[in-house]
Image (tube, rainbow, N blue to C red):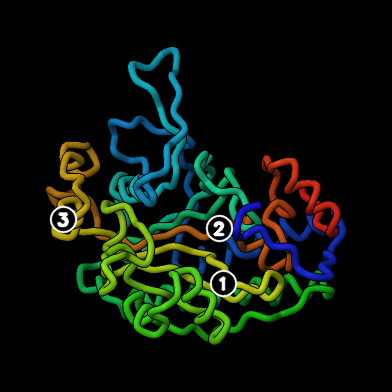
Amino acid sequence: MPKRFIIPQGYQSRLDLVETQLAIKAAKDIFEKELANALNLIRVSAPLFVRPSSGLNDNLNGVERPVQFDVKDLPEDVQVVQSLAKWKRLALYRYGIAPGHGLYTDMNAIRRDETLDSLHSIYVDQWDWELVINREDRTLEFLYSLVKKIVKALTRTQYRLCQIFPQLDEFLTDDVTFITTQELEDRYPDLQPFERECEIAKEHGTVFISQIGRPLKSGKPHDGRAPDYDDWNLNGDIIVWNPVIQQAFEISSMGIRVDENSLAEQLKMAGCEDRRELMFHKMLLEGKLPLTAGGGVGQSRICMLLLQKAHIGEVQVSEWPDDMVETCAQNGIILL
């Protein structure tokens, strides 16, 4: 079984199957409105697939293989999106959206190389959002202010959901602890990155771990990040302590996006300077695209957390190994 396949001792779902479906709908509806209001966003339609030559698809950690297929009437293959970080920035340019305003969309993806466990599925569903900012906003302080707004949207959703389903508990607070990846490594030098996340989340509840992508003093980055969307000095993950599975639980990856200078630097560091010739990268290097901040918030992750489920397959329909399905059923974890 995968390392993060967890069977909580004595687990029993607080909601039956019908209640679960109703709670999924409620949680998504409430959080979507809270997020849009908090960050001043409008909803837009987004693609399920893009052409590789556009440079719009994301490389995530740089090793995941996108799902690619041919289309009868197109001259080249298309790829299922892995996220919409770059597409959203181009959309903001096309729509002419002003600073202080932004957009969000429902992003659906297939990540074929995901390791399947209690938290990870090959099917990804998230709210992808992007906000136009001014150059003076490209600071950690501004990034942290966005984090606080997202966490507040989450706790407001939790409160309203618990009113509808009183069998659920309120366990999240508005308090957020901010720490850089280097500070985290310095605090726990003998632990692996995920183990560090578990320690800090267990201690503080909700944490924003910033500056992901660059090598640390140990010579290794905390985690991988593609070089062409987040500025590695101005990004991070929102992590909470999940009381059901008793470990750190990532709900959002976000950041202030690269400008022309940080893009050029990070492409060189990653050995990806060939991307400079792609449409998106050319426009960015020429200063044509707006400065933005953005991220993704996992829809099934939010539902799993707030509905206090033990497996992400309890709140989304996907495919799982037969032995995992059987083990879950034996332990009261009913996958949809």
Residue at the spot x=55%, y=58% of the render? Answer: 298
Please state the horizontal and vertical placement of residue 267, each as a whole percent of the image: 19, 51
Q: Secondary structure at mark 2?
A: strand
**Is 258 placed above or below 143 here?**
above
Residue at the spot x=57%, y=68% of the render? Answer: 249
Q: Which residue bears the numbered disc 1?
A: 248
**Is 94 placed above or below 166 here?**
above
Q: Which residue bears the numbered disc 2?
A: 298
Q: Within the image, what quadrant is residue 258 found in?
A: bottom left
Q: Secondary structure at mark 1?
A: strand
Q: Are marks 2 and 1 in contact (CB under 8 Å)?
A: no
Q: Residues within 10 Å of mark 2 (few under 14, many from 20)?
A: some
Distance CA(mark 3)–CA(mark 1): 34 Å
For badge 1, the amino acid type reads Ala
For badge 3, the amino acid type reads Glu
For badge 2, the amino acid type reads Gly
Q: Which residue bears the numbered disc 3?
A: 260
Please state the horizontal and vertical placement of residue 91, each as a whole percent of the image: 35, 46
Front in this rendered view, residue 283 or 95: 283
Please state the horizontal and vertical placement of residue 222, each as a whole percent of the image: 37, 67
**Is 7 placed above or below 47 here?**
below
Q: Nearer the viewer, mark 3 or mark 1?
A: 1
Q: Within the image, what quadrant is residue 333 found in?
A: bottom right
Distance CA(mark 2)–CA(mark 3): 28 Å
Residue reaching furthest top?
A: 72
- Mark 3 or mark 1: name the one nearer the start of the chain: 1
Residue at the spot x=60%, y=58% of the render? Answer: 3
- Mark 2 or mark 3: name the one nearer the start of the chain: 3
